[in-house]
Image (cartoon, helix red, strand yellow):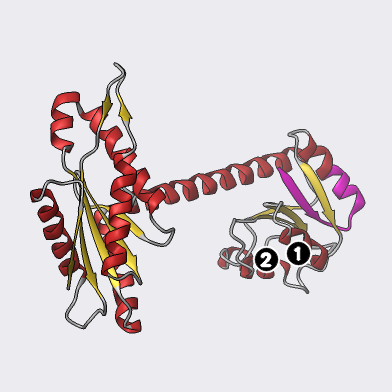
Amino acid sequence: MKILVLSNDVAERKLIQQVAGQDGHEIIPAGDSETAIELLREGEVRFVIADRITTDIEQKQFVKRTRDAKPPYYIYILLLTARVEDSDITTPRTGADDYLQKPIVPLELKSRIQIGQRILGLGDNLAQAKDALENTALFDPLTRVLNTRAFISFSYGELERARRAQSPLSLIALDIGNFKSIEEEFGEAISNDMLAVVAQGIREKSRPYDGVGRYDASTFLIILPGVIGPDAGKIAQRVTNGIRSTEVSLVDGRNLQVELSAGVASSIRITASIEIEYLIEKAMQAMKQAKREGGNQAVTVFV
C-alpha cells in the first residue's frame, strides 16, 4: 500500500518509513498541503499520515479539502497531533479517521496503520458487494440482458424521449418456439445454453444503445429508438436469421436448431395515449401470429 506522509519532521518521516516498511508499505513524502493534494489527485494513494504540528494542514484546511474533493474511492487519514481536540470527535465526517498523539510509539503506529488498511479493505468489499447487488437487480443472471423490471424501466425512458421528440419507436418480441420441447427432451442445462446463445445473438445483432431484456422463460424484448416499422421488421428478421444460423452442439455430436418467431410493434409518432405495456402487448400478439403462420419469421404491426 502507498502511504502519503505529510510531515516536515525528518526524524518522524524516517520512523514512519521504518515502521511501515516492515509490512511492505511504500512511503510518499510531502512537505506541504498543496503538494499532498496534487499527489492525491494522481489516484494512487488511499492512506495519509499527516502531522498537524509541523505542516500547514490547519491553515490550508487539508482534511476538509480532501473530503470535499469527493474522489471515487475513500482516503483514510491518520492525523498526528499533540492532543485530540473536541472538534475532532464531533465532526467525524469532515475530519480525520484516526488520531495518534505524539511522540510516536512505533508499535502503536503499526497497529493504527493495520486498522486503517483493514477498514479500507472492508470499504472496498462493500463497494464490490453493492455493485454486485445492483447488477443482480438489473440483469437476468442467465442471459446477462436486462430483466423484466429493468427493461420496462429503461423502455419508459425511451418512450418519453420519443414522445417529446415526436420520433418513431419500435419494439420487438422474439420467442424461442421449440424451447419447451428442448427442455423436456434434453434437460434444463441444454435449454439454458440455448437461452444464452439466443441472448448473445440478440446483443450482437442489435445496436449498442438498443434495450434488450428477457421477458419470460423463452421470450426476449428489444426496444428500438428512432426506428420505423419496415426497418424494425428488417432488424427482427436479421436477428432471427443470425440466431438460427448459430448451432447449439450436444456432447453426442448432434446440433440443435433454434426456432424463432418475432413480432414487431411500431409507432411512427408516440402519442399521449401510447404506453410501453401497450407496445409490448401488440408486439406479443404479432409474435404469436408469426408462430401461427409457421414460425421463423417476423410479423410487423403499426400502432
Quick one: SS at disc 2? helix
Residue under the point 63% across and 64% down: 95
- In the rendered structure, does residue 6 fall within the stretch colored magenta? yes
The disc labelled 2 sits on which kind of residue? Thr
**Mark 2 to mark 1 CA distance (whole Å):** 7 Å
Residue under the point 26% across and 80% down: 269
- 280 in relation to 272, above or below: above
| Residue 211: x %, y % from top left | 34, 60
Asked whether, in this view, residue 139 is left or right of residue 131, the answer is left
Residue ID for mark 1: 37
Magenta segment boundaries in residue numbering: 1-15
- 180 in relation to 233, above or below: above
Residue 137 appears in the picture as rendered: no
Return the disc, 2 or 1, that comes first in the chain's sequence: 1
Observer-nearest residue: 80 or 73? 73
Q: Is the C-beta separation of discs 2 and 1 under 8 Å?
A: yes
The disc labelled 1 sits on which kind of residue? Ile
| Residue 143: x %, y % from top left | 32, 43
- 255 in relation to 85, above or below: above
| Residue 26: x %, y % from top left | 78, 42
User: Which residue is most to the left?
Assistant: 292
